[in-house]
Amino acid sequence: MKTILIQINSTNSTFFKYPKTIQTLIYTTNPIESLNSNIKRKTKSKGSFPTVDSAFKLLYLATQEVQEKWKNSRIRNWSEVYPQLSIFFSEIMEKYTK
C-alpha cells in the first residue's frame, strides 16, 4: 500500500509542478482517454463483429472521428497557455511552431 501511495504522489507531483493553465490543459485534453472512450462507445453499440476486418474498419472510423473532432477544437485561454507551454516545453514548442 505504501508503494502505491508513493507512486501516486510522484505522479501527482509531476502534474502539480506546472501552473494552473497547463494543469487544466493536461487534465481536460487527454487524447488517449478521449480515443478510448469513443472506441468503447462504438464497439459497445455494435455488439459482435462478423469478421476481424469489420472490427478494424470500425476502429479506424472511430479514430478518424476523434481526429476530426480534435482538429477543429480550440484551446480555452490560449493567450495564457501558449507562453507557459513555451517556457516549460521550449524544445518541443520550437519544433512544432516554426
Image (tube, helix red, strand yellow):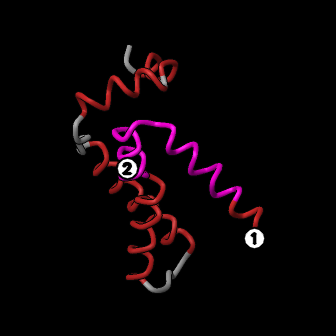
Residue 97 placement (x, y as % from top left): 37, 19
Residue sitting at x 63%, y 54%: 9
Residue sitting at x 56%, y 51%: 12
Against 93, is 73 above or below?
below
Q: Which residue is mark 2?
A: 29
Instruction: Decide which of tag 2 and tag 1 comes sooner along the chain.
Output: 1
Most common secondary structure along the magenta stretch? helix
Q: Amino acid at mark 1?
A: Met
Residue 53 placement (x, y as % from top left): 53, 68
Image quadrant where one finds the N terminus: bottom right
Tags 2 and 1 in contact by the CB under 8 Å rule? no
| Residue 1, numbered circle | 1
Left or right position of 82 against 47: left
Image quadrant where one finds the C terminus: top left
The verdict on residue 24 being magenta is yes
Against 70, is 34 above or below?
below
Q: Looking at this view, name the residue that lies furthest to the front.
A: 2
Residue sitting at x 37%, y 27%: 84
In front of the other: 2 or 55: 2
* Of the two numbered discs 2 and 1 in the rendering, the one whose residue sits closer to the viewer: 1
Left or right position of 11 against 96: right
Badge 2 density bin: few <14, some 14–19, many ≥20, Cα 10 Å: few
Indicate the quadrant where residue 77 lies: top left
Residue sitting at x 39%, y 62%: 62
The CA distance from mark 2 to mark 1 is: 30 Å
Count all numbered tags in the image, as a single digit: 2
Q: Which residues are magenta?
A: 6-30
In front of the other: 40 or 22: 22
Indicate the quadrant where residue 40 lies: bottom left
Left or right position of 89 against 65: right
